[in-house]
Image (tube, rainbow, N blue to C red):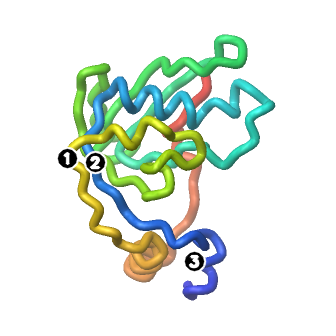
Amino acid sequence: VTWGEVFAILPFGNRTVIATYTGAQMKVALMNGVSPNCDSAIHTGRTPQLSGMRITFTCDGTTPVITGMWLTPQGMGGPETPVTDTTTFRMVINDFVYTGGDGYTNLIEGTDVLQPGDDLMEIVAAYIGAHSPVSAAVEGRVVKQ
């Protein structure tokens, strides 16, 4: 894979942020992320891309409702731990969504925040280089019921 190919999908210069969140905070963020599935008037790229987690949701009219959240530290098909409103966990997100981009306005509320500032394009390129070939697959991490 070339830098140009990675840049084509990650052209924004985003950097990493690590923070602790509660299940209740994640529920708010994820309702924002899946909202275009419930309201066709919402046209942004806010769909959540999850790793280490699985969610299910439904729509109550145009309002998304998160019906389940599970931590999946060994990936899909491995053990799952239900996430409750009081569950806390660490997440790596990009600085754009951390500061409210794509409507993720509550992610700034994370605690124990670290901003190592690793370049996401470099991280992805290094991963692809170490694990090639890679392929995309729908794993069922975000499922509308």
- Pick whichever, 26 or 136, lies toward us: 26
Residue extending farthest to the left is 112
Residue 63 falls left or right of residue 14 = right
| Residue in the image at 53% along x and 43% along y | 48
For the residue carrying disc 1, how many other residues have a C-alpha within 10 Å: few (<14), some (14-19), or many (20+)?
few
Q: Tag 1: residue type? A: Asp
Question: Dividing the picture into quarters, in which one does residue 81 lie?
Answer: top left
* 122 to 84, vertically: above or below: below
Query: Residue 124 in the image: x percent, y percent?
Result: 45, 72
Q: Which residue is mark 3?
A: 6
| Residue in the image at 29% along x and 54% along y | 18
Q: Which residue is mark 2?
A: 19
Q: Are marks 3 and 1 in contact (CB under 8 Å)?
A: no
Q: Locate the N terminus by quadrant.
A: bottom right
| Residue in the image at 41% along x and 41% along y | 107
Q: Are marks 2 and 1 in contact (CB under 8 Å)?
A: yes
- Mark 2 and mark 1: Cα distance apart in space: 6 Å
